[in-house]
Amino acid sequence: MNDTFKIGHYSDHKHVTGCTVIICPENNVASCYISGSAPGSREVSLLAPERKIMSISAILLTGGSAFGLGAAEGVMNFLEKKQLGYQTPYGNIPIVPAAVIYDLNIGNKSVRPTAENAGYACKNAASSFEDQGSIGAGTGATVGKWSGIENAMKGGLGIAESRTDSTWIRCVSIVNAVGDILNQNGEIVAGSYDMIKKKFNKNITKPV
């Protein structure tokens, strides 16, 4: 019985890409909201309120742009062996919505996360959500690209959570923005290298 969320990562720091898998507990209720002008996704239409499917088996977040969506096969293969998925008369069908980021502008554009890479992330998935930064699907994430990729800074994977007596919310986000990242006061905390350097009037090593 899978009764808790688990997260696993595959990080390719040599080629600057990766993927993250979140394995979901059984009998969950899933939905989604899609924004942006060019979303890259797989199986998310199943999550619309009028669809038959309510529970999902896992979520794949990956680099590689649309090429990375193929990594979902590795998640499905892993879950099928565990007999997890949507029950049909002829077997279990793992339901694995996936979303991608565009990271072909950094690292090696011909190397994208594969089914084998996603399977590795599944095998190493654990209930600890402590790891953050340039890992998993956030390995090739960048911010501040509006002034050119040569002035961009690394983005990454971030996790936040909030608890009350009756509610526990955990958010996993991959920050791969064209623009700069601002704090709640409207101050730039990461983004275009030239703008950050000018604002803080100090030398900053380009991380890209």
Image (cartoon, grey):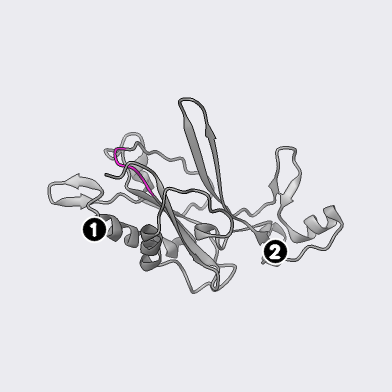
Query: In front: 85, or 147?
Result: 85
Q: Residue visible at 67% across and 65% down?
A: 149
The answer to whether mark 2 and mark 1 are in CB contact below 8 A is no
Q: Residues within 10 Å of mark 1 (few under 14, many from 20)?
A: few
On-image quarter of the N terminus: top left
Residue 184 picture location, percent across and down: 70, 38
Q: Residues within 10 Å of mark 2 (few under 14, many from 20)?
A: few
Mark 1 — residue?
81
In what element is the residue under mark 1?
helix
Type of amino acid at the residue the image marks with label 2: Gly
Residue 83 picture location, percent across and down: 22, 52
| Circle nearer the viewer, 2 or 1 | 1
Q: Earlier in the sequence, mark 2 or mark 1?
A: 1
Q: What span is colored magenta in the figure?
A: 23-27
Q: Which mark is residue 191?
A: none
Whether residue 60 appears in this view of the structure is no
Is residue 26 shown in magenta?
yes
On-image quarter of the C terminus: bottom right
Type of amino acid at the residue the image marks with label 1: Lys
Residue 115 picture location, percent across and down: 36, 65
Q: Residue visible at 56% across and 53% down?
A: 132
- Mark 2 vs mark 1, CA separation in Å: 44 Å
Q: Residue visible at 49% across and 63% down?
A: 18
Whether residue 117 appears in this view of the structure is yes
Mark 2 — residue?
148
Magenta: main secondary structure: loop
Is residue 74 shown in magenta?
no
Query: In front: 196, or 147?
Result: 196
In what element is the residue under mark 2?
loop
